Amino acid sequence: MRIHHIGYLVKKLEKAAEEFEKLGYVRLGDVTDDTYRKVDILFLEKDGYAVELVSPNAPDSVVSGLLKTYKNAPYHICYVCEDLDGELERLTGSGYVQIDPPAPAPAIGGRRVCFLMNRFAGMIELLEKED
Ligand code: NI
């Protein structure tokens, strides 16, 4: 698995993006409305590092509850997998708890992602490799 991006949970996406730009980050594309997860997503890049800004756009968004714990803060690391289902099986067999079924991520070209939680390492995201 290779690191793909760091996910930041932010309350105001546009304001946050402007602040990252002051630090030298460059936007990768436009804001995407992920209607499945009810979040707005924007990727930025600096020095080869990709940061994903995630902001809930509905009260029942998958991340609304997380804002109490992570506000304008990193909350997951995403890994690209050669074999998403294989890694999912391996990790759920060794202490990682699957949060949701693998589902397409509109902000990453519709590639499937899924989230897992570990009591010591926190939240991670698995992303299937590009075709
Ligand atoms: Ni992510």
Image (cartoon, rainbow, N blue to C red):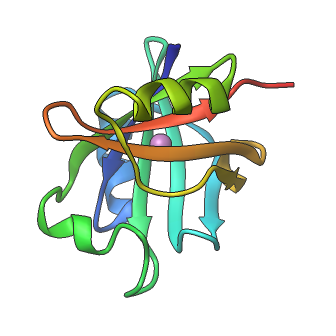
Q: How many marks?
A: 0
Residue for point 33% across, 60% down? 15
In the picture, which quadrant includes the C terminus?
top right
Relative placement, left or right, of 128 versus 130 is: left
Give whichever of 122, 15 is nearer the camera: 122
Where 15 falls versus 78 (above or below)? below
Relative placement, left or right, of 41 versus 77 is: right
Residue for point 64% across, 29% down? 84
Q: Which quadrant of the figure has residue 121? A: top left
| Residue at the outermost bottom position | 59
Residue for point 54% across, 33% down? 88
Q: Tell me where residue 49 appears, x and y as whole percent.
A: 44, 19
Where 14 falls versus 53 (above or below)? below
Q: Which quadrant of the figure has residue 69? A: bottom left
Where 102 falls versus 131 (above or below)? below
Relative placement, left or right, of 81 versus 1 is: right
Q: Tell me where residue 27 appears, x and y as whole percent.
A: 55, 39
Residue for point 13% across, 32% down? 120
Q: Tell me where residue 58 appears, x and y as whole percent.
A: 45, 84
Give whichever of 37, 49 is nearer the camera: 37
